Amino acid sequence: MFDLLGKLVDPVSNILDKVVEDKDQKAKLAHEIATMAERHAQELARGQIEINKEEAKSRNIFIAGWRPFVGWTCGLALFWHFLGLPVTLFVTGWFDLQHPPLPEFDMQSLMTVLLGMLGLGGMRTFEKFKGVTK
């Protein structure tokens, strides 16, 4: 992203060289332009944080319930992959039972989602510890 910003700032700086005579004013304007995108990104992040706070306060399952749903889904898939499937295969093999092909999950994708949620869960635990939430 910063490479893209550099590509955008350089032409603007060249225009400033032609338009603005004062070197200090030119440097100040160039700095303002260079930091504008970063400030905008920070404002967007703050806005998203506020939206997340409002979602978390909601009692409507369709607003605040999607995170627990994804967490339970990941937990069930993880349970199936590491415990359910091996035990099922063992029991059916032990008793020589026939069974249809059992589902297997893409663990790389699952772990990406699960680890991301666990990171968010860690922040939630920190908030509860600090007494920020109920």
Image: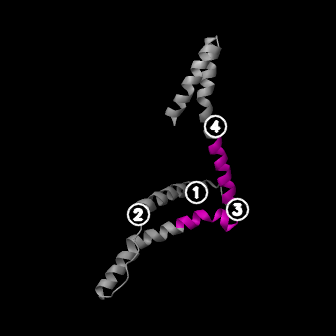
Please identify the residue farthest to the top as the structure is shown: 21
Residue ID for mark 2 = 107
Q: Is residue 65 magenta?
A: yes
CA distance separating discs 2 and 3: 31 Å
Res. 107 image quadrant: bottom left
Res. 86 image quadrant: bottom left
CA distance separating discs 3 and 4: 28 Å
The label on residue 40 is 4
Residue ID for mark 1 = 124
Residue 112: give x, y in percent of width and height: 45, 57
Secondary structure at numbered mark 4 = helix
Dot 4 or dot 1, earlier in sequence: 4
Res. 58 image quadrant: bottom right
Looking at the picture, which amino acid does disc 1 mark? Arg
Dot 2 or dot 1, earlier in sequence: 2
Secondary structure at numbered mark 2 = helix
Secondary structure at numbered mark 1 = helix
Q: In the figure, is residue 83 to the left or right of 21?
A: left
The label on residue 58 is 3
Q: Alpha-carbon neighbours of circle 3 within 10 Å: few (<14), some, or many (≥20)?
A: few
Q: Considering only vertical position in the picture, is 109 above or below 18?
A: below
Residue 33: give x, y in percent of width and height: 62, 27
CA distance separating discs 2 and 4: 36 Å
